[in-house]
């Protein structure tokens, strides 16, 4: 189902590259997927949403943090298809202030319940209760669980697709990606791993996790990549060693801006006019900058940085940016 504006641009960041003394950095602008300010979830929803619509549901039930990019893009996709949306949102570090993603959720007509807990692991029973409440009202709710393996794998197909798109753009520019850097917790890096393997890329995938959970991210991402490969009928298997996953750039907790993230956001903006977000891409860029300064890359290396979006949240974090 077409939801995104594709292909998204692939652009150089020449001044940032020069400021770091290399590598060559190309940025894949998935912040420009277009659906209600875009981001990586739009590609994921292109596959998941077709499934949702096919069930005949009339109401989407979903939940995450108040500044969730995923809930914002789901709400937009639902609006386009005339489905009602019930969001149950954990307050997180930014709470119920009417800014960024929460503002957009409400603008697009989502009914929002903000619950006064800070732990997303406690959300599933609250979502189940919301489903029951909707059924009792005679609605046909569809619960989009961000934790089910089938949902994760189907969503990851969007990023297998993104690798195919990137492959043509790189071929046209006559460059090869030595590294792909991205902010990724599960779906996005899994799809990229599968796509890169399917196309025979010899590219190191480096995921910077915005969050730390009990299961280490590399193991979990490999598990989702395996399910995605099976879904596509690809005879490939993945293990944690197939990617590099960094869990130290999150800082004290999910959603809190670190000093390195703040500096990375300002550097990308000042050098190339590229705006990053405080929760995901700013932390991934902080890692890329640190790795460049540690001289991890060769002079001729090319890094593709995936800009996964998240920009509306920037406005909810205005006072955290040190300006
Ligand atoms: C959700 C999100 C991510 C992480 O994507 P996964 O598919 O969960 O790995 C990265 N960046 C932004 C801006 C996001 O909203």
Image: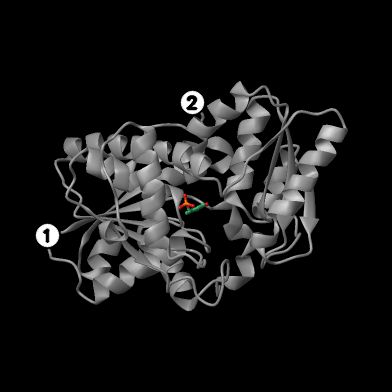
Look at 56% across and 42% down and name the residue there. 37
Look at 20% across and 50% down and name the residue there. 177
> Which residue reaches farthest right?
137
Any mark on residue 323, and which? none
In the image, taking residue 200 as reference, residue 26 lies left or right, namely right
- Asked if the residue at label 2 sits under 8 Å from ligand 1, the reply is no
Q: Is residue 27 visible?
A: yes
The front one of 54 and 236 is: 236
Q: Is residue 39 visible?
A: no
Question: To which quarter of the image does residue 21 belong?
Answer: bottom left
Q: Position of residue 111 (x, y in %)?
A: 79, 42
In the image, taking residue 201 as reference, residue 53 lies left or right, namely right
Q: Position of residue 74 (x, y in %)?
A: 61, 39
Colour convention of the picture: one colour
Mark 1 against mark 2, which lies toward the viewer? 2
Callout 1: SS: loop
Q: Position of residue 48 (x, y in %)?
A: 53, 33
- Asked if the residue at label 1 sits under 8 Å from ligand 1, the reply is no
Look at 50% across and 25% down and name the residue there. 1
Q: The C terminus is located in which quarter? A: bottom right
Q: Earlier in the sequence, mark 1 or mark 2?
A: 2
Question: Callout 1 environment at 10 Å: few (<14), some (14 to 19), or many (20+)?
Answer: few
Q: Is residue 169 above or below residue 69?
A: above
Look at 30% across and 40% down and name the residue there. 163
Q: Which residue is mark 2?
A: 2
Alpha carbon distance from label 1 to label 2 = 37 Å
Q: Which residue is mark 1?
A: 300
Q: Is residue 35 above or below residue 217?
A: above
Q: How many marks?
A: 2
């Amino acid at each position: 189902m077409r939801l995104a504006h594709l292909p998204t641009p692939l652009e150089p960041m020449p001044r940032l590259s020069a400021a770091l003394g290399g590598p060559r950095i190309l940025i894949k602008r998935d912040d420009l997927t277009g659906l209600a300010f875009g981001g990586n979830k739009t590609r994921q929803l292109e596959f998941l949403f077709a499934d949702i619509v096919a069930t005949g549901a009339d109401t989407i039930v979903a939940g995450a943090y108040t500044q969730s990019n995923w809930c914002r893009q789901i709400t937009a996709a639902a609006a386009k298809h005339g489905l009602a949306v019930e969001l149950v949102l954990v307050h997180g570090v930014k709470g119920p202030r009417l800014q960024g993603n929460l503002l957009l959720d409400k603008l697009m007509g989502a009914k929002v319940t903000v619950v006064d807990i800070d732990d997303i692991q406690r959300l599933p029973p609250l979502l189940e209760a919301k489903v029951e409440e909707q059924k009792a009202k005679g609605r046909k709710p569809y619960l989009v669980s961000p934790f089910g393996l089938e949902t994760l794998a189907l969503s990851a197909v969007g990023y297998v697709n993104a690798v195919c798109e990137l492959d043509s753009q790189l071929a046209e520019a006559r460059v090869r990606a030595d590294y792909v850097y991205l902010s990724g917790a599960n779906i996005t890096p899994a799809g990229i791993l599968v796509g890169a393997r399917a196309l025979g890329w010899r590219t190191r995938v480096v995921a910077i996790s915005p969050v730390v959970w009990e299961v280490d991210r590399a193991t979990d991402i490999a598990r989702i990549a395996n399910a995605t490969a099976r879904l596509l009928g690809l005879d490939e298997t993945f293990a944690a060693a197939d990617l590099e996953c960094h869990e130290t750039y999150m800082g004290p907790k999910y959603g809190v801006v670190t000093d390195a993230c703040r500096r990375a956001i300002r550097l990308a903006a000042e050098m190339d006019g590229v705006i990053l977000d405080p929760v995901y891409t700013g932390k991934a860029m902080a890692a890329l900058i640190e790795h460049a300064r540690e001289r991890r890359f060769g002079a001729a290396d090319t890094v593709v940085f995936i800009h996964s979006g998240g920009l509306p949240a920037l406005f909810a974090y205005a006072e955290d940016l040190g300006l």
